[in-house]
Image: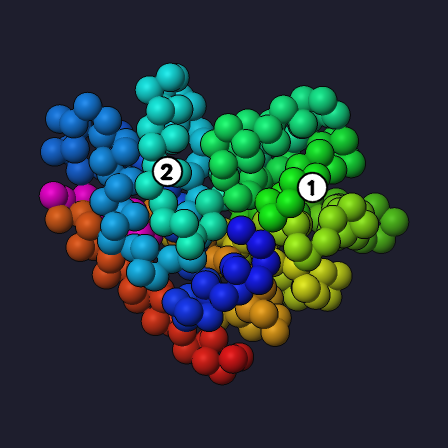
Amino acid sequence: MNRAKLIEQIRLKESFLCVGLDPDLNKMPKHLLAYEDPIFEFNKGIIDATKKYAVAYKPNLAFYECLGVAGWNSFQRTIEYIPDECLIIADAKRGDIGNTSLYYAKTFFETYNCNALTIAPYMGSDSVKPFLTYPDRWAVVLAMTSNQGAKDFQFIESENIPIFESVVRKCIEWGTPENLMFVVGATRSEDIAKIRKLAPEHFFLVPGVGAQGGSLDEVVKYGMNSDCGLLVNSSRGIIYADTSEDFKVGAKKEASKIQSAMEEHLRRLM
């Protein structure tokens, strides 16, 4: 999916919601465990409940890989079920040198036909550039994350600027707003403004709204641009809003609530 189509979906759905598909067998409704593929059945229900409100889905590979071959099968079935108009972000946080990154790109962009992949940039250009060679695919680079441990490295200053700013400054030399996004955590809203100033046209994938305490209003205030430029992710807040047999109802209700708030922001913009 290219940038123009993504913006079109944001306008059509009046939403910039990304739903994180983090299926945990210990948290999902127990009746699903009777199915041959409970992971897929859970994801299918969440997608059915939220596809009216979401412009993107983000399966977190950790929840699939831990189950071996069965988990990879569930992942494949899930991404094949996601509607074509939605951006598919494989949250795999890959990042390695040269040829290895090329094969990671081949895995997620060719074998599994995902639209985007989260990338760890610690190894530099070798770990990012191979993912930028695919037309209409996105490298989503970790810049400033929402977790507590982010301060261990991301905020260390080098030449009087924090490392997360150095990451953004360097990465925008390698990619464009058409193929490069940044992960920007919602829990540090004022720092979002710093990254937006450095990357005025790039999309941000924003985790941390909801369960982690981030504010949608603050994210919009500091991060929205003229094309919206935001994909705000919610995982636990939506997919585990209700863990009964009626889990789809709870997921739909929560996704609708978030979309309604997003709609208000977009109407002021557009």
How far across and down, in percent of the image, does residue 226 sit? 61, 74
Label 1, label 2: how many angstroms apart (C-alpha)?
A: 23 Å
Q: Main secondary structure of the magenta part?
A: loop
In the image, residue 238 lies in the stretch drawn in magenta: yes
Q: Quadrant of residue 191?
A: bottom right
Is disc 1 placed on a helix, strand or loop? helix
Residue tagged 2: 80
Q: Is residue 191 above or below residue 84?
A: below
Which amino acid lies under the numbered mark 2 shown in the image of this protein? Glu
Say left or right for 149 vs 216: right
Which amino acid lies under the numbered mark 1 shown in the image of this protein? Leu
Work out whether residue 152 or residue 35 is closer to the camera in this orientation and state it: 35
Q: Pointer 2: residues within 10 angstroms few (<14), some, or many (20+)?
A: some
Question: Which comes before the other along the chain, label 1 or label 2?
Answer: 2
Q: Is residue 50 above or below residue 152?
A: below
Residue tagged 1: 132
Work out whether residue 165 or residue 79 is closer to the camera in this orientation and state it: 79
The residue shown at (58%, 70%) is 227
What segment is highlighted magenta in the picture? 237-245
The residue shown at (13%, 26%) is 34
In the image, residue 169 lies in the stretch drawn in magenta: no
Can residue 58 be spotted in the picture? Answer: yes
The residue shown at (39%, 30%) is 76
Say left or right for 250 vs 129: left
How far across and down, in percent of the image, does residue 208 sit? 47, 52
Q: Which mark is residue 201?
A: none
Q: Quadrant of residue 195?
A: bottom right
Task: Check the image and name the residue furthest to the top.
Answer: 69
How far across and down, in percent of the image, does residue 246 sit? 13, 48
